[in-house]
Image (tube, helix red, strand yellow):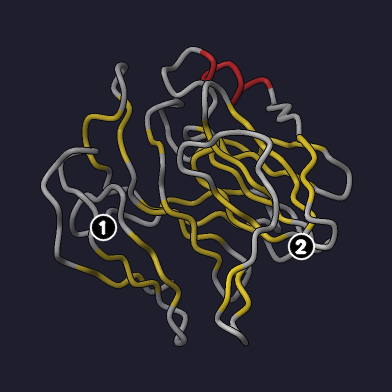
Amino acid sequence: MYDPTSGKFTRAGSQLHYYGGVTAIPLPSGKVLLIGPELGPKAELFDPAGGKSTSLTLELPPGAAAVASSSWYQQDPETAALLKDGRVLLCVFDFLVTYDSATGSFTQPGSISSVPGQWIEPTATLLPDGRVFLAGGYLDQGSGPQDSASSTGLYDPSTDKFTPTGPMTIARGGHTATLLPDGTVLIAGGTAEGVTGTALSSAELFKP
């Protein structure tokens, strides 16, 4: 645990699972959802008050589970964002899945790609109006991601609908997407030709 007042770290315990690229999402309950891949999807709920974690079973809906189980990513929920209503938005490949921590249930609003299972690892940025902006990532072409993606879109939790918003000026994977005070999103860096492609020094702005 990091205390910004004192600038010090204290040991908070140990995770229950090993993760490759763990994502930590603070929940309305005060607990923290840890989720990431490591020989299949793993997740746990960390309680800062008690300093302990409990394992969480990821019961993915049929569509997402079917596409993910046939892939080398092994059902990796690679993108996660906390929605304003307290649910967590997950992107399992290009299937959108929402997790309700209050009920422990998973729902599947749909897909962000016209060809399920090809657009993976986009960034997810919560906008002031409650929508989530998804951008870039990689294109899965059967043996793992081989090209960076330029696709973007908006997920509206009030309707559970995803709407494409057009391509970025440059295809990017492994980039950052940061919400600015005026509501625009700064998209920066990443790689241009897949996971091991050319590193980018450029940036661009998305205005909802």
Residue that badge 1 annotates: 168
Q: Residue at x 77, y 45 (%)?
A: 53
Crowd band around label 2 with a 10 angstrom C-alpha radius: few (<14), some (14–19), many (20+)? few
Looking at the picture, tell me which residue is in the foreground, 160 or 83: 83
Residue 102: % across, % down: 87, 50
Q: Residue at x 40, y 37 (%)?
A: 120
Residue 141: % across, % down: 28, 22
Q: Is residue 82 left or right of residue 194?
A: right
Q: Residue at x 74, y 53 (%)?
A: 87
Q: Are marks 2 and 1 in contact (CB under 8 Å)?
A: no
Q: Is residue 63 left or right of residue 167?
A: right
Residue that badge 2 annotates: 85
Residue 104: % across, % down: 84, 40
* SS type, badge 1: loop
Discs 2/1, front: 2
Looking at the picture, tell me which residue is in the foreground, 46 or 128: 46
Q: Mark 2 to mark 1: distance in Å? A: 29 Å
